[in-house]
Amino acid sequence: MSEKTKAHIAVRFRAYPTVEQARQIDRTIGCVRFVYNLMLETRIAHYQTTWQSCRPTPALYKDTYPFLREVDSMALCNAQLALEKAYRRFFDNGRKGFPKYKSKRRGKASYTTNRIGGNIRLDDNARRLKLPKLGWLAVRQHKHIPNDWKLKSATVEHCPSGRYMATILFERETQTPEQVKPVNIVGLDYASHGLYVSSDGKRAEYPGYYRKTQDRLALEQRRLSRMTEGSANWRRQKRRVARLHEKTADQRRDWQHKKANALVKTYDAVAVETLNLKGMTARPKPKPDMEHPGRFLRNGRKAKSGLAKSTLDNGYGMFCDLLKYKLARQGKQLVRVDRWYPSSQLCHDCGYRNPQTKDLSIREWTCPSCGVIHDRDVNAALNIRDEARRTVERYDS
């Protein structure tokens, strides 16, 4: 018998604040950033003078800066929690880096507030959201919220395009899904221009939304570069560029959700290869010419830039994250194959390893051992599927 567990679900609505509400939202975002930077500065200064750590709270600064009392206090408390989390991540994993000051120009402009009593409410009938210091805020509610969902917190974001978004976190009780025995497994081989090729021979055919918008985006960015920074026309043009970026991201996210849902509905398990996406999108290092000091050899920068652009466009990492949580909801699993597994070099029929297929320009090849003609991507997807099946069997045994 399956047990009951608590699950968290985040629902994102577009918000339509009044002029006064928009000012209060921007004021709260600015105060949250201001308090975060103050607490970080205090902690650094205290450690440099006493060699001991301290944990300042937002209440420490309210007498010196009275305008902090005009915004939601829970939003300021969440800024303190965010700073604590940044410090924990730094000490647990040094690769995350030391906490940095938040910038007004860069980063996400948002704040989070928690539900205490009835300070946050969602009215399904009137399609409005009640928030502290804001009152009732009009939202475009595209999804009905069941009565047994418990509202936990709300995050308000001011997007670079000028839109306001409200993300509401709910908690609900759900049955722990029974684990599905992975019988029907599909392997996915990464494809830079189409996202993936499956072991069934199907291609994802990702539309490439960024590529489609690239020419228009370049035109709008060129116009932005010719304007005086900080002027009204510059701000208007900057929002126009941001809208193009957000539209591309929305299209990509919608397409990936639909494609992931189709895979989860059809298969018991999905096998993917672990890729070094950071290395695939990094700029190649210059190659000095030893025979001619001061000159450089070709390093494949032009070809690498095209691959990097396609990799960033299709969002393979985000797609794998979507698959993981959607499969887990139904008791299924996402199997990640080791990045060093030579899926493209092995013949799926006889197991012969052909090192010549390291050349990515070879799209079809004939096995020297058994004579079978392989499509490079389909053969790799079949090998990924079989390796995932062996991995699952090892864990089950």
Image (cartoon, helix red, strand yellow):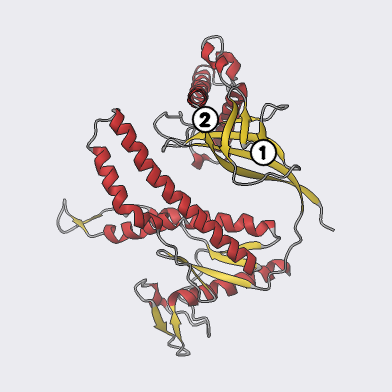
Front residue of 202 and 47: 202
| Residue behind mark 1 | 125
Front residue of 198 and 208: 208
| Residue behind mark 2 | 17
Residue 335: horizontal and vertical position, in percent?
Answer: 61, 64
Residue 105: horizontal and vertical position, in percent?
Answer: 39, 31
Label 2, secondary structure: give it. loop
Amino acid type, callout 1: Asn
49 left or right, relative to 185: left
Front residue of 348 and 137: 137
Q: Is residue 394 shown above or below 284?
A: below
- Mark linked to residue 310: none
Identity of the residue furthest to the front in this view: 126
Q: Residue 116, located in which quarter of the rendered image?
A: top right
Amino acid type, callout 2: Pro
Residue pictured at 64% horizontal, 36% vertical? 126
Residue pictured at 52% horizontal, 58% vertical? 256
What distance separates the C-alpha of mark 2 from that of mark 1?
Answer: 18 Å
Quadrant holding the N terminus:
bottom right
136 left or right, relative to 31: right
Q: Earlier in the sequence, mark 2 or mark 1?
A: 2
